[in-house]
Image: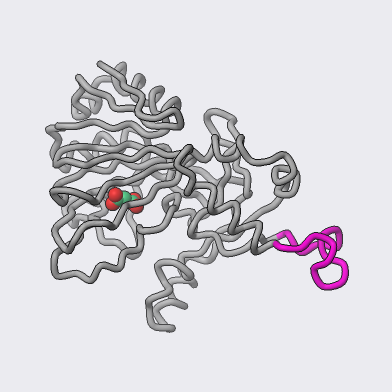
Amino acid sequence: MHIEQLTCALGAEVSGVQLADAIHDDGLFAQLRELLLRHRVLFLRNQAISRSEHVAFARRFGDLEDHPVAGSDPDHPGLVQIYKRPDQPLDRYENAWHTDATWREAPPMGCVLRCVECPPVGGDTMWANMVLAYQQLPADVKARIEGLRARHSIEASFGAAMPLDKRLALKAQYPDAEHPVVRIHPETGEQVLFVNAFTTHFSNYHTPQRVRFGQDANPGAGELLRYLISQAYLPEYQVRWRWSAGSIAIWDNRSTQHYAVMDYPACHRKMERAAIKGEPTF
Ligand code: SIN
């Protein structure tokens, strides 16, 4: 196995390995799991892996979950099809920095994304290290956000383009989730800046300590949230991956955000993603 770190922030390309072998090889799987915690995103090219093997490999980390809006492969539950076709309009939900499904009380712990087909150029995916983003925050901002919690909404994201009745039904099924603004990574104990495109507002900001007459004691909850969300946009925290058919990314969804770059003309881009169930953030 050869490991090549891709940026100073996160991401490593792993070569000399077939992920299908890790389905039955406990030692190989343990090595990959350890590498994932260290590098946060692992990339592998030229993977000869079937859909069943993709599911079986991801299931080594835990149970898989489907997505209420994006469809799954009917023959492989848990394998979400992120397919773009030439006849589709170029408006795409994933084109915002996000951590997957933080509108769930227990967002996925990680994902395994396989490229089936991609544009000849463009359509890369980027990831950001949200542990580093937290570490690099100015001390006064760290003090301001200590103890803050925030709401994450499927209604205001995937639901936004739906007619009212469908949007409200989606919200009834998936009420907004609340997470700490600084999450503790359950395996490494690291502090993670945990707000993203699904985050709508702080849920415990408006207290007498911060709000006296109007907002005068400590203004700007909205601005503070926007500032925190924008930290993922900094190139110093990022890695960018150029896809080819048969390449795979495995990411730790607890400590990263990602962004699918929508710079390509209308064409086929076929990605299949297994999302592994995570734990509540408390
Ligand atoms: C995702 O947002 O999980 C998918 C990323 C991609 O399609 O590159």
Which is nearer the eye, 204 or 79?
A: 204
Q: Where in the figure is residue 29, as x and y percent of width and height? A: 31, 23
Q: Residue at x 13, y 65 (%)?
A: 86
Q: Identify the image quadrant of the N terminus.
A: top left
Which is nearer the eye, 9 or 202?
A: 9
| Left or right, 212 with reference to 236 | right
Q: How is the image coloured?
A: one colour
Q: Where in the figure is residue 248, as x and y percent of width and height? A: 24, 37
Q: Is residue 209 magenta?
A: yes
Q: Where in the figure is residue 137, as x and y percent of width and height? A: 64, 41
Which is nearer the eye, 243 or 248?
A: 243
What secondary structure prevails in the magenta region?
loop
| Left or right, 168 with reference to 214 | left
| Left or right, 221 with reference to 262 | right
Q: Is residue 151 positioned above or below 108 on the image?
A: below
| Magenta segment | 204-220
